[in-house]
Image (spheres, rainbow, N blue to C red):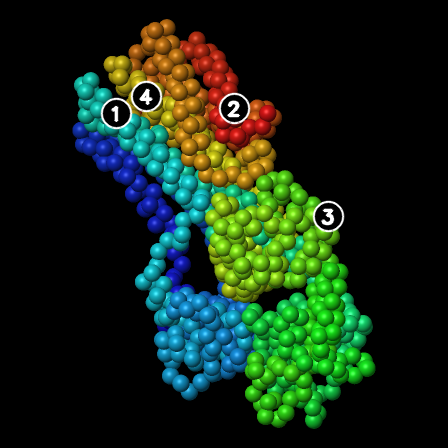
Amino acid sequence: MARHGPNEPVPPRRTTALRQLASLLSNPLTVTLLVASGISASLGEWTDAALIVTVVALSTAVNFAQFHRSQRAVERLQATTTPTATVLRDGRWQELPRSQLVPGDVVRLVAGDLVPADGRLVEARHLFVQQASLTGESLPVEKVADPQAPASPDPDSPHMVFLGSSVVSGVGVAEVVATGPGTVFGALARRLAGRPPETEFERGLREFSHLVARTVVLLTLFVLSVSVAVGRPPLQSLLFALALAVGLTPEFLPMVTTIALAQGAVHMARRKALVRSLPCIEDLGSLDVLCTDKTGTLTVGEMQLDRSVDLRGRPYPRPFALAWLNSRHQGGLQNPLDAALLQQPAPGWPEQEKLGEVPFDFDRRRASVAVRMGAEVLLVTKGAPESVLPCCTHYETCEGIFPLDADAAGSAAEAVRELSRAGFRTLAVAWRALGPEEASDVDVHTERDLVLAGFVAFADPPLPEAGELIRRLQAQGVRTKLVTGDHELVAVHVWRSLGLDPKQVVLGEELARLDAAALEQVAEEADIFARVSPAQKHQLVLALKRRGHVVGFLGDGINDAPSLHAADVGISVVNAADVAREAADVVLLDRRLETVHDAILEGRLAFGNVLKFLLMETSSNFGNVFSMAGAALFLPFLPMLPHQILLNNFLYDLAQLAIPADPVDPQLASRPRRWDVRFVQSFMWLLGPVSSVFDFLTFFVLLRVLHAPEALFHTGWFVESLATQCLVVFVIRTARAPWRHRPSPLLVANVLACVLVGLLLPYSPLAGPLGFVPLPVPYLAFVLLATGVYLVAAELAKRLAFRRAGLLNG
């Protein structure tokens, strides 16, 4: 470990405290302000320079502390979903974090595993590996053991397996020869390292940032030009313009977003859903289609053997006995059906010796084992009825063995239909005796001329609450679609058992005949997709995304990985196949549909709180900055000193820090919400001017009624602007009347404390250095009245904006 380091192909980029602090201090506006402050100090303006540096330092410190704390919380959560490997250590097989592997370790591979490092195969049986991430080849390739062959970095080497690939079928044991950056995948990842594809949430943030940047540049250049044109000192004009730019820039947005998403991740973890990437929480809030299998989500998820029957559906114990034998000796992918078989009492076979195996894969959909019992050698095959029956030439009943003619095949098909119609998951079981030569080397060609013993049927009762949850999701704007490889009659039985009416059922063979446009239409309309292949699941997800939906996909199998990766939000379970869990954005500790429902609601709550902050920042800040820009045209002095603007902005930002912990209006969380920068822009243009109207009214009272000198004007407007823009959060935070949805006590305390600080500053020892003077009582009465009227006007403007955007009912 000391020589090679942890087994990470690309060392995880952890945001260290120093790097985060450097990022905050390197903000262009911050750097420019600090440089301008240095120039002021060199010209003797020590007080202004010290005040500006102090406010910038306080703002950076608060931003850093909150952001750093949230990042640590997220990293602790993500550490619980690290990939593992089955390693031979201290003489026994054990599960260890993949990062702990070193060259020389011996690892075991089974279907569904991610290959944890580059290794040389010392054992392999029918091992097929998907290594498209290394070669671009979509088809699995067969690997064979050759312990004496030299290690090779060539992915086409048949005796080598590589990090970044996954096991499709078979079993193997490999000796690790390279880890971390020394692997083929590690070298490739370093060359191609870059950002992952942009999520809808990140795209919305980028568009919003462009909107703010355009507004900041235009207003700053305008104010700077006007100030210099009317003869004000250039340095003071620059500081004033920069302070305005800081006032309009939502510099706390990354921090508030991270806090909101981190709190959402913590809440989801308490509800047994672990988030692997923060942006997916926002995408959960936008999700409007959920594709899911039925096992464990719509059903209890605990398979129980219900019956063992012959091809005519009559009770017959031999299919169970043979199926038990197959599961007992199967070395590849284990599933709940195998577990259900092995939970039953052993059927009384004599001593057995496993001679060979043809592991399960998703093309054949069956598994076979060759077992010696005394002088007899049997090949026992079990799998999906439609994959086993074509391999059979005979069938058996309690009366004997008979040719599998057309009538018998029809009886078998009818027995499968009846079992499926009753909601049973059904496996066909077949066998044949093997000669000495065949027994030594079984493969897929050995699966022929089989004798059909019958069927074993498994029950997985529907979850009583699943139907109500699907109806609740539908009412909240999320449509659930059942996508399964099972028989359509089983799928329909489960759907109806939940009290749901399937509008349209589509089979995989029907999907195969559709063109892209027709596939999109069918994906939109149908509720149930049965007998679908892994490729068809993937195509369905992509078709729904092309229709403009935000798609969630819930799966846990090897064949679900492409669909999990293609979905906007991939959801898997903690005991899923490695390849599925690594492809997912959310990992469930509890597979129940209720956990998914709770995760979707958490996503909406996080989205709602980020939206609150955006609306606050753009509307209030834009109004104040617009007022300052206007005042700069006619006032003989600056409407507010640069350090006063920065202090005002700092107190205002502090007041908003509690927004991520504020409850979201249920009306805003009742439907999926998607980024709409046009709505934010229209909200800004509607509410901003309302704020400016009251600012100009304040100017009139200060100049014409009180005949305020410069210091009194600065103080009066500082107090009025801080009170109005802080208190309006109680209006903007809800789509309805403020008193109908109460804010959190923390938000109330935070906002009122910041307003109180602003009111007390003119009467404190800091008044002189800050350039404040005590305010007359009549003006304080005016501020109280004007603030109340402003909040009423803001409520009316907000309702108009929300109604235009369709966010307000009634």
Contact? badges 4 and 2 (CB < 8 Å)? no
Q: Secondary structure at mark 2?
A: helix
Q: Secondary structure at mark 3?
A: loop
Q: Determine which residue is flagged by label 2.
A: 799
- Looking at marks 2 and 3 on the same chain, the residue that comes earlier in the sequence is marked by 3
Q: CA distance from mark 1 to mark 4?
A: 11 Å
In the image, 521: left or right of 33?
Answer: right
Q: CA distance from mark 2 to mark 3?
A: 39 Å
- Residue depicted at x 51% and y 58%: 538
- Tell me the crowding category of disc 3: few under 14, some 14 to 19, or many 20 or more residues within 10 angstroms, Cα based: few
| Coordinates of residue 329 in the picture (x, y in percent) | 64, 80
- Residue depicted at x 39% and y 12%: 697
Give amino acid for label 4. Answer: Met
| Coordinates of residue 288 in the picture (x, y in percent) | 55, 44
In the rendered image, the vertical position of residue 26 relative to residue 750, given as above or below: below
Q: Nearer the viewer, residue 448 or 644?
A: 448
Q: CA distance from mark 1 to mark 2?
A: 32 Å
Using the image, tell me which numbered label, if any, was put on residue 499.
3
- Looking at marks 1 and 2 on the same chain, the residue that comes earlier in the sequence is marked by 1
Q: Determine which residue is flagged by label 4.
A: 628
Marks 2 and 3: which is nearer the front?
3
Using the image, tell me which numbered label, if any, was put on residue 222.
1
Residue 701 visible at all: yes
- Tell me the crowding category of disc 4: few under 14, some 14 to 19, or many 20 or more residues within 10 angstroms, Cα based: many
Marks 1 and 3: which is nearer the front?
3
In the rendered image, the vertical position of residue 779 relative to residue 17, given as above or below: above
- Residue depicted at x 66% and y 79%: 392
